[in-house]
Image (cartoon, grey):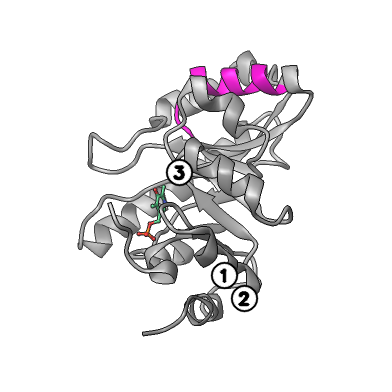
Amino acid sequence: MTTIAENIAHIKQQLPPHVTLIAVSKMHSAEDIMLAYSAGQRDFGESRPQELLPKAAALPKDIRWHFIGRLQSNKVKMVAPCAHLIHSIDNVKVLHELNKVCERLGITARCLLQVHVAQEETKLGFLPDGLFAYLTSGNAGALRNVQICGLMGMASNTDDMEQVRREFRLIRQLHKRGRELAHQPALFTQISMGMSGDYAVAIEEGATLVRIGTLIFGGRQV
Ligand SMILES: *Cc1c(COP(=O)(O)O)cnc(C)c1O
Protein backbone atom coordinates (compact mmCIF):
# COMPACT_ATOMS: atom_id res chain seq x y z
CA MET A 1 0.00 0.00 0.00
CA THR A 2 1.18 3.49 -0.79
CA THR A 3 0.81 6.42 1.59
CA ILE A 4 -1.20 9.58 1.05
CA ALA A 5 2.04 11.54 0.64
CA GLU A 6 3.28 9.08 -2.00
CA ASN A 7 -0.03 9.21 -3.86
CA ILE A 8 0.11 13.01 -4.00
CA ALA A 9 3.74 12.99 -5.15
CA HIS A 10 2.90 10.48 -7.86
CA ILE A 11 -0.02 12.53 -9.21
CA LYS A 12 1.87 15.82 -9.01
CA GLN A 13 4.65 14.38 -11.17
CA GLN A 14 2.12 14.11 -13.98
CA LEU A 15 0.62 17.59 -13.68
CA PRO A 16 1.81 20.39 -15.94
CA PRO A 17 2.64 23.55 -13.97
CA HIS A 18 -0.62 25.32 -14.91
CA VAL A 19 -2.80 22.55 -13.41
CA THR A 20 -3.75 22.65 -9.71
CA LEU A 21 -4.43 19.44 -7.82
CA ILE A 22 -7.46 19.54 -5.54
CA ALA A 23 -7.39 16.69 -3.04
CA VAL A 24 -11.03 15.68 -2.61
CA SER A 25 -11.26 14.88 1.09
CA LYS A 26 -15.02 14.37 1.44
CA MET A 27 -15.79 11.54 3.85
CA HIS A 28 -12.15 11.35 4.91
CA SER A 29 -10.88 12.27 8.35
CA ALA A 30 -9.07 15.37 9.54
CA GLU A 31 -6.08 13.08 10.27
CA ASP A 32 -5.90 12.04 6.61
CA ILE A 33 -6.21 15.65 5.52
CA MET A 34 -3.30 16.54 7.80
CA LEU A 35 -1.16 13.80 6.23
CA ALA A 36 -1.79 15.43 2.85
CA TYR A 37 -1.18 18.88 4.33
CA SER A 38 2.17 17.76 5.74
CA ALA A 39 3.07 16.63 2.24
CA GLY A 40 2.52 20.21 1.07
CA GLN A 41 -1.04 19.90 -0.23
CA ARG A 42 -3.10 23.06 0.32
CA ASP A 43 -6.13 22.73 -1.97
CA PHE A 44 -8.87 20.43 -0.70
CA GLY A 45 -12.35 19.65 -2.03
CA GLU A 46 -15.48 19.00 -0.01
CA SER A 47 -19.00 18.36 -1.21
CA ARG A 48 -21.24 18.82 1.83
CA PRO A 49 -21.62 22.06 3.81
CA GLN A 50 -22.07 20.22 7.11
CA GLU A 51 -18.76 18.46 6.54
CA LEU A 52 -16.84 21.47 5.19
CA LEU A 53 -17.64 23.80 8.10
CA PRO A 54 -16.20 21.76 10.99
CA LYS A 55 -13.15 20.83 8.92
CA ALA A 56 -12.50 24.43 7.93
CA ALA A 57 -12.85 25.52 11.57
CA ALA A 58 -10.50 22.86 12.92
CA LEU A 59 -7.79 22.66 10.26
CA PRO A 60 -5.00 25.09 9.28
CA LYS A 61 -6.15 28.46 8.00
CA ASP A 62 -3.93 28.40 4.93
CA ILE A 63 -5.94 25.52 3.43
CA ARG A 64 -7.88 26.58 0.34
CA TRP A 65 -11.27 24.86 0.49
CA HIS A 66 -13.02 24.10 -2.78
CA PHE A 67 -16.73 23.41 -2.59
CA ILE A 68 -17.60 20.85 -5.27
CA GLY A 69 -20.97 19.40 -4.22
CA ARG A 70 -24.57 20.31 -4.85
CA LEU A 71 -25.19 23.71 -3.30
CA GLN A 72 -28.71 24.49 -2.20
CA SER A 73 -29.72 28.13 -1.81
CA ASN A 74 -30.34 27.76 1.91
CA LYS A 75 -26.75 26.50 2.44
CA VAL A 76 -25.04 29.33 0.57
CA LYS A 77 -24.49 31.39 3.72
CA MET A 78 -22.68 28.45 5.36
CA VAL A 79 -20.36 27.86 2.44
CA ALA A 80 -19.58 31.37 1.16
CA PRO A 81 -17.37 32.52 4.06
CA CYS A 82 -15.06 29.50 4.04
CA ALA A 83 -14.78 28.53 0.38
CA HIS A 84 -11.81 29.70 -1.67
CA LEU A 85 -13.71 28.66 -4.81
CA ILE A 86 -17.22 27.26 -5.28
CA HIS A 87 -17.13 24.96 -8.33
CA SER A 88 -20.73 23.82 -8.41
CA ILE A 89 -22.97 26.79 -9.18
CA ASP A 90 -25.51 24.94 -11.31
CA ASN A 91 -28.30 27.47 -11.75
CA VAL A 92 -28.97 31.22 -11.80
CA LYS A 93 -31.01 31.22 -8.62
CA VAL A 94 -28.17 29.92 -6.45
CA LEU A 95 -25.71 32.29 -8.14
CA HIS A 96 -27.88 35.28 -7.29
CA GLU A 97 -28.36 33.99 -3.76
CA LEU A 98 -24.57 33.79 -3.46
CA ASN A 99 -24.24 37.40 -4.57
CA LYS A 100 -26.89 38.51 -2.06
CA VAL A 101 -25.30 36.62 0.83
CA CYS A 102 -21.84 37.98 0.02
CA GLU A 103 -23.16 41.52 -0.23
CA ARG A 104 -24.63 41.16 3.26
CA LEU A 105 -21.36 39.69 4.60
CA GLY A 106 -19.23 42.28 2.84
CA ILE A 107 -17.18 39.67 1.00
CA THR A 108 -16.57 38.63 -2.59
CA ALA A 109 -16.97 34.97 -3.55
CA ARG A 110 -15.16 33.24 -6.39
CA CYS A 111 -17.11 30.61 -8.28
CA LEU A 112 -17.31 28.46 -11.37
CA LEU A 113 -20.45 27.70 -13.34
CA GLN A 114 -21.14 23.99 -13.59
CA VAL A 115 -22.05 22.86 -17.09
CA HIS A 116 -24.00 19.76 -18.02
CA VAL A 117 -22.31 17.79 -20.80
CA ALA A 118 -22.66 14.16 -19.64
CA GLN A 119 -25.15 11.69 -21.02
CA GLU A 120 -26.79 11.31 -17.63
CA GLU A 121 -29.89 12.96 -16.26
CA THR A 122 -28.38 13.07 -12.79
CA LYS A 123 -25.55 15.47 -13.58
CA LEU A 124 -26.62 19.01 -12.85
CA GLY A 125 -25.61 22.24 -14.47
CA PHE A 126 -26.12 24.85 -17.15
CA LEU A 127 -26.85 23.68 -20.67
CA PRO A 128 -24.82 25.50 -23.35
CA ASP A 129 -27.64 27.76 -24.52
CA GLY A 130 -28.59 28.69 -20.98
CA LEU A 131 -24.96 29.41 -20.14
CA PHE A 132 -24.43 31.75 -23.08
CA ALA A 133 -27.79 33.45 -22.59
CA TYR A 134 -26.99 34.09 -18.95
CA LEU A 135 -23.45 35.35 -19.55
CA THR A 136 -24.65 37.88 -22.10
CA SER A 137 -27.54 39.05 -19.94
CA GLY A 138 -27.31 42.17 -17.85
CA ASN A 139 -27.83 40.01 -14.77
CA ALA A 140 -24.34 38.53 -14.91
CA GLY A 141 -22.80 41.99 -15.29
CA ALA A 142 -24.73 43.27 -12.29
CA LEU A 143 -23.18 40.81 -9.82
CA ARG A 144 -21.05 42.92 -7.51
CA ASN A 145 -20.00 40.33 -4.92
CA VAL A 146 -19.33 37.28 -7.07
CA GLN A 147 -16.50 36.67 -9.50
CA ILE A 148 -17.20 34.07 -12.16
CA CYS A 149 -13.82 32.42 -12.67
CA GLY A 150 -14.67 29.80 -15.29
CA LEU A 151 -16.44 26.47 -15.70
CA MET A 152 -16.68 23.11 -13.98
CA GLY A 153 -17.96 19.90 -15.48
CA MET A 154 -18.10 16.16 -15.16
CA ALA A 155 -17.89 13.58 -17.91
CA SER A 156 -20.22 10.60 -18.11
CA ASN A 157 -19.41 7.73 -15.81
CA THR A 158 -18.32 5.35 -18.57
CA ASP A 159 -15.33 3.25 -19.64
CA ASP A 160 -15.60 4.77 -23.11
CA MET A 161 -12.65 7.17 -22.89
CA GLU A 162 -13.41 8.62 -26.32
CA GLN A 163 -16.80 9.74 -25.08
CA VAL A 164 -15.17 11.18 -21.95
CA ARG A 165 -12.70 13.04 -24.16
CA ARG A 166 -15.48 14.46 -26.35
CA GLU A 167 -17.30 15.72 -23.27
CA PHE A 168 -14.18 17.36 -21.82
CA ARG A 169 -13.47 18.90 -25.23
CA LEU A 170 -16.98 20.34 -25.25
CA ILE A 171 -16.38 21.90 -21.81
CA ARG A 172 -13.20 23.47 -23.17
CA GLN A 173 -15.13 24.88 -26.14
CA LEU A 174 -17.87 26.20 -23.86
CA HIS A 175 -15.16 27.83 -21.77
CA LYS A 176 -13.59 29.51 -24.78
CA ARG A 177 -16.92 30.94 -25.94
CA GLY A 178 -17.96 31.75 -22.38
CA ARG A 179 -14.81 33.75 -21.88
CA GLU A 180 -15.57 35.83 -24.98
CA LEU A 181 -19.02 36.58 -23.58
CA ALA A 182 -18.08 37.04 -19.92
CA HIS A 183 -18.29 40.47 -18.33
CA GLN A 184 -14.87 39.96 -16.75
CA PRO A 185 -12.97 37.76 -19.21
CA ALA A 186 -9.70 38.31 -17.35
CA LEU A 187 -11.19 36.37 -14.42
CA PHE A 188 -12.75 33.63 -16.54
CA THR A 189 -9.62 31.46 -16.66
CA GLN A 190 -10.34 28.19 -14.86
CA ILE A 191 -11.59 24.84 -16.15
CA SER A 192 -12.33 22.34 -13.38
CA MET A 193 -12.60 18.85 -14.84
CA GLY A 194 -11.12 15.41 -14.27
CA MET A 195 -11.37 12.99 -11.33
CA SER A 196 -9.44 9.86 -10.33
CA GLY A 197 -10.57 7.86 -13.37
CA ASP A 198 -10.22 10.47 -16.09
CA TYR A 199 -7.90 13.28 -15.00
CA ALA A 200 -5.19 12.46 -17.54
CA VAL A 201 -7.68 12.94 -20.39
CA ALA A 202 -9.04 16.09 -18.74
CA ILE A 203 -5.55 17.62 -18.64
CA GLU A 204 -4.99 16.80 -22.30
CA GLU A 205 -8.27 18.57 -23.05
CA GLY A 206 -7.43 21.73 -21.11
CA ALA A 207 -8.24 21.30 -17.41
CA THR A 208 -6.64 23.82 -15.04
CA LEU A 209 -8.06 22.26 -11.85
CA VAL A 210 -8.36 18.49 -11.29
CA ARG A 211 -10.43 17.08 -8.41
CA ILE A 212 -8.96 13.80 -7.18
CA GLY A 213 -10.16 11.83 -4.16
CA THR A 214 -9.89 8.04 -4.44
CA LEU A 215 -6.38 7.99 -5.93
CA ILE A 216 -5.10 10.00 -2.96
CA PHE A 217 -7.12 8.84 0.04
CA GLY A 218 -8.44 5.46 -1.12
CA GLY A 219 -12.09 4.45 -1.25
CA ARG A 220 -14.84 6.20 0.67
CA GLN A 221 -17.05 4.38 3.18
CA VAL A 222 -20.64 5.17 2.31
C1 LIG B 1 -16.18 12.96 -5.17
C2 LIG B 1 -15.93 13.91 -6.28
C3 LIG B 1 -14.69 13.94 -6.94
C4 LIG B 1 -13.55 12.96 -6.66
O1 LIG B 1 -13.86 11.71 -7.19
P1 LIG B 1 -12.75 10.52 -7.20
O2 LIG B 1 -13.28 9.59 -8.22
O3 LIG B 1 -12.76 9.95 -5.82
O4 LIG B 1 -11.46 11.11 -7.57
C5 LIG B 1 -14.50 14.91 -7.92
N1 LIG B 1 -15.46 15.79 -8.23
C6 LIG B 1 -16.68 15.79 -7.62
C7 LIG B 1 -17.68 16.80 -8.03
C8 LIG B 1 -16.94 14.85 -6.62
O5 LIG B 1 -18.13 14.87 -6.04
Query: Which residue is the site of mark 2?
Result: 39
Is 176 rendered above or below residue 197? above
Q: Which residue is mark 3?
A: 47
Marks 2 and 1, how far apart in space?
5 Å
SS of the residue under disc 2: loop
Confirm or deny contact between disc 3 and disc 1 (CB under 8 A): no
Residue 155 picture location, percent across and down: 33, 50
Between the C-alphas of marks 3 and 1, the distance is 18 Å
| Spatial CA span between label 3 and label 2 | 22 Å
**Residue for badge 1:** 36
Mark 1 and mark 2 in contact (Cβ < 8 Å)?
Answer: yes
Kindly identify the residue that appears in the image at 64 percent across and 42 percent down.
188
Residue type at the position of mark 1: Ala
Q: Is residue 71 visible?
A: yes
Span of residues in magenta? 89-102
Q: Earlier in the sequence, mark 3 or mark 2?
A: 2
Tally of numbered discs: 3
Specify few, some or many for label 3: CA neighbours under 10 Å numbering under 14, 14-19, or 20 or more.
Answer: many
Query: CB at mark 3 closer than 8 A to ligand 1?
Result: yes
